[in-house]
Image (cartoon, helix red, strand yellow):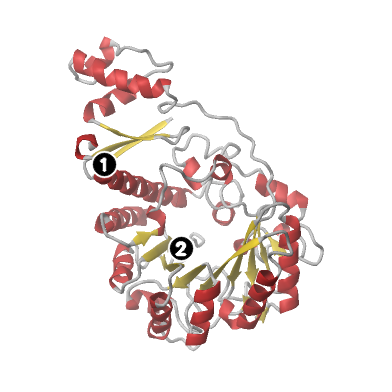
Amino acid sequence: MIHTFSGWGHHVVLDVESGAVHLADELSLALLPHIRLPMAPDCPPAVARAAGADPAEADEAWRELYTLYKQGLLFAPAAELTPPTGRLKALCLHVSHDCDLRCGYCFAHAGDYGGARVTMDFDTARTAVDLLVRLSGARRNLEIDFFGGEPLLALDTVRRTVEYARAHEAEWGGKHFRFTLTTNGLGLDDETIDFLNREMDNVVLSLDGRPGVHDALRRTAAGEGSYEKVLPGIRALVERRDRDYYVRGTFTARNPDFADDALYLASLGFKHLSMEPVVLPEGHPLALREEHLPAVFAAYDRLAGALRGESGVSFFHFRVDLTQGPCVYKRLRGCGAGFEYAAVTPEGDLYPCHQFVGREAYRMGSVREGRLDPAVAARFAALTVSNKPSCRDCWAKYFCSGGCAAAALNMTGALDGRYALGCEMQKKRLECAILTAVDRMAGEAPAEARP
């Protein structure tokens, strides 16, 4: 299977199964639709005629394509792979089911996930860390994400958990923890900033873009806009940070022109950006709909063009490694929710990820029970692109790894369902990402090797 598209003067050919990406000329692009497998070593005269090409020129282009075919880099056959089950490697600790904002699109019901407003005590967090260590087996590198609600409302638990894990890394056989925290920025004072910049390998900072866009939906419990309240702390953290971070926005039906918001954030000096499409039930006034796709696609195109060659500005969804990407097993099933990754509520209940919290059918036990429910884990481990009917013939399957199971369930009622709108947005930003990568590599190549 191949996928072709063009932009910025490049004709891109992606060989789906091998992962090879080629830059083609117009003649090769014209020949590709006429190739039948197994590929013949010489260009059939009928193909040259169909492509409207000179026979000698067509034969030369054909031989180049045939060489790629024989090397397994064009029309490569699908591999039948069964990924290993894997061991637990990451936990999302919901240290707070409370929040000091009331965002209009919040999937967590303003931070309480439909329940009581509570925070996690250290004993529960410590038990969760112990569970992660035990179930990780021989894995050395482990991840803990501090999440909410707003995790800074449980900062003492965060601090003690980091201290506990770090103090026992050597004792636990040389384990190494990588910590991440997601915050709305309201609680960022100098002391907290210093702690996060010292201990967190990554910090995700929520800021939706232009002040009016942000304030329309990210409001305080008192109903006030939060932009002016959070920007100083977010800026101070980024200015003093020498480690990974993302300034992350959410776009909705109100701003399908989100490129303006991303570029506004870049103008403030933020170098690592993400803009995520909201996922809301059909009929919600903020939900993205099919009618928004042209504007969303135009925004991705405009953003890619604006960031073309822009030194130091990185957009999360335009980052793709065409030379040494994720291993094949990760490409088959993505994030590992439910078997390599789990979420822990303040009470210690286990769920496949943060978006399943509160769905009793997907509860996987508790940290005090000391295991992940094997039946639920098996359901999630089986969610590979090979097992999803809608993914098998999709060119993007090894980049999106089948997409988000929670989004599929929320939008279709099935874990292996196809959230069509999300798929279309994913494919568009993947084209922008691949085009960005090949354009950069073409620009770095010696002049004689450039297309």
Q: Is there any visible trace of residue 253 in the rendered image? A: no
Q: Residue at x 72, y 67 (%)?
A: 128
Q: Is residue 120 above or below residue 175?
A: below
- Where residue 403 appears, as percent x and y from the top left, is 52, 49
Q: Do tag 2 and tag 1 residues touch (Cβ < 8 Å)?
A: no
- Where residue 228 appears, as percent x and y from the top left, is 38, 85
Q: Is residue 201 above or below residue 394?
A: below
Q: Secondary structure at mark 2?
A: loop
Count the numbered circles shown.
Answer: 2
- Out of 315 and 172, give the one closest to the viewer: 172
Dot 2 or dot 1, earlier in sequence: 2
Q: Is residue 286 above or below residue 190?
A: above
- Out of 223 and 28, give the one closest to the viewer: 28
Q: Is residue 432 left or right of residue 156?
A: left
Three-letter amino acid code at the position of disc 1: Ala
In the rendered image, the quadrant that contains the C terminus is top left
Q: How many C-alpha atoms fall within 10 Å of the one at disc 2: few (<14), some, or many (≥20)? A: some
- Out of 422 and 7, give the one closest to the viewer: 7
Q: Residue at x 78, y 58 (%)?
A: 371
Q: CA distance from mark 2 to mark 1?
A: 38 Å
Q: Is residue 113 left or right of residue 283?
A: right
Q: Is there any visible trace of residue 194 in the rendered image? A: yes
The picture quadrant where one finds residue 447 is top left
Residue of label 1: 445
- Where residue 420 appears, as percent x and y from the top left, is 47, 48
Which is closer to the viewer, label 2 or label 1?
1
Q: Is residue 302 left or right of residue 228?
A: left
Residue of label 2: 278
